Amino acid sequence: MQTVFGARLEHYASTARASPALAMPGREIAYSELLRRVRSCAAWLTGEPGLPLQPVGITIAEEIPHLVASLTLLSLGVPQISLPTSEPVSKRLNLAERLGVGRVLLTDPQYALPGRDAQLLTPDLDDPAAGHASLDAVLSDPDAPAIYFTSSGTSGEPKVFALSQRALAWRAELITASERIGAGDRSLTLLSVEDFLVKSRLLRCAYLGLTSVLAESRSSPSLSVQELCASLGVTCLELGVLQASSLVLDNTDPRPLPAQTKVHTAGATVSLALRHRFKTRFGVPLFVHYGAREFGRIASTFPDSDDEELETVGLPVPWIDLEIVDDDGKPLPPGEVGEVRVRSECMTREYHRDPVATARHFKDGWFYPRDLASLTPGGALCLHGRADDMMNLNGIKIFPSEIERVLEAHPAVKAAAAFSRSSAALGDIPIAAVELHASVAIGVEELMACARERLGVRAPRKIIVLDALPRNAAGKVLKRELASLLAASD
């Protein structure tokens, strides 16, 4: 029996195709070669004693070995979890213990975990003879857990959830269709392969027989994003918000991006100022997606958004149901701020062995990402921050997003984050932290005056300037760390 992904790889490798599986400066890898590498890795894994049905960890930062390892485990029906090289041993070990990981695949032995079997993927595993081995699955159930992922972790310890091969395939088909990606398109993502967004897009392309472009090269000098997109025919470029912001300020290569390159970003708030600066700098729009790892895509500004000037994240995608509800779960009309809830046909239903978090986020068939939002008259979604972050200053509700938007509109401010300090007398005292553009000098009082003029009583009572806002790997600001920094400075 074959798995969903195993069958797809076999099909693409046996079909005459103009599109390679992978493209990078100086070389391409066809689907037939990718399958040979997967078969070789599968023969090596199944030749080892005791191939487990419990999750196998992958701690590999290199793109091709990581993708081969992931596709091999998908083809064998063995569940997997990425244990990123960027995380300290304690965090990787904690996640391995939560999931019962007994074996970790590596390319660098320094990332081995204490008490876990380490299997080293080496170049000699690419054995042509083994490349003809069958891909018979250990477990072929399409609804069994295939990949375990973690939530973004902005509100505490990351929660763990599983996606089946059926769910991965369902997401791949819908998201790719919504982005109007088809045969001949090429996708490039510049974040680490250990990042959720990158791995998801690579697997979507592999499932649909599309081409993924990789920036790594053994022989070519480093190329700019513009050169990569132009020379390798990139039609879909996905950037992190921080990457998009940094590229706007980078004048190393003054050329625009190719007109055929559609640029997408997700994972964190994208200010209207950044969207405008990006389009001015590169000549193409920056499309914004909003979603949750547990649920998938929720809204998007692609292919256009009439309400973009309101800094929306676009219209809800057509395959989901979305409502904005009050504290009692009653749907609210456009313009009123409430909590987002969503549902879809193939959504995750629970967190792994976490009934408390499951009860908090999954209710009556709906998923609650715990974000505050409103709908515009045109139906676009406008985010107002995390439900847990909303401030109540002596009875006045203050949304972090309104403070952040005002500060980020100032030309000196690269990014802003609003949070609160608790007061027994007044409730939540609004505070803001800002990260300034390089080589910009501005006094805090000028920023305070700007905020007071625009926000009045909702203005922050204190603004602190940091070299860089604390962020997680997805680029989201860790506001709990800002609160700790403030407490330590008092």
Image (cartoon, rainbow, N blue to C red):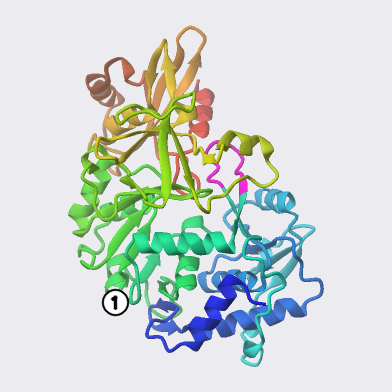
Tell whether 158 sits left or right of 43. Answer: left
**What kind of residue is marked 1?**
Ser
In this rendered view, identify the residue nearer to me: 277 or 150: 150
* Residue 107 seen in the current view: yes
- Locate the N terminus and report the quarter of the image it occupies: bottom right
Q: Height in image: 170 above or below 220?
A: above
Magenta stretch, overall SS: loop
Q: Height in image: 243 above or below 219?
A: above
Label 1: how many residues lie within 10 Å, few (<14), some (14-19) or many (20+)? few
Q: In which quarter of the image is residue 38?
A: bottom right
Q: Where is residue 425 in the image (x, y as percent from the top left)?
A: 48, 6
Q: Position of residue 273 (x, y in %)?
A: 24, 42
Q: Does the magenta stretch include residue 26?
A: no
Figure disc tally:
1
Q: What stretch is highlighted in magenta?
A: 151-160
Q: Where is residue 204 in the image (x, y as percent from the top left)?
A: 47, 66
Q: Quadrant of residue 428?
A: top left
In this rendered view, identify the residue nearer to me: 425 or 46: 46
**Residue name at image x 81 percent, y 71 percent:** 50
**Residue name at image x 70 percent, y 60 percent:** 55
* Residue 267 seen in the current view: no
Q: Quadrant of residue 215?
A: bottom left
Q: Mark 1 points at which residue?
A: 231
**Residue name at image x 77 percent, y 57 percent:** 114
Tell whether 315 sits left or right of 150. Answer: left
Q: Residue furthest bottom?
A: 129
Tell whether 273 sits left or right of 212. Answer: left
Q: Height in image: 425 above or below 315?
A: above
Q: Which residue lies furthest to the top in this view?
A: 425
Q: Position of residue 205 (x, y in %)?
A: 45, 70
* Local secondary structure at mark 1: helix
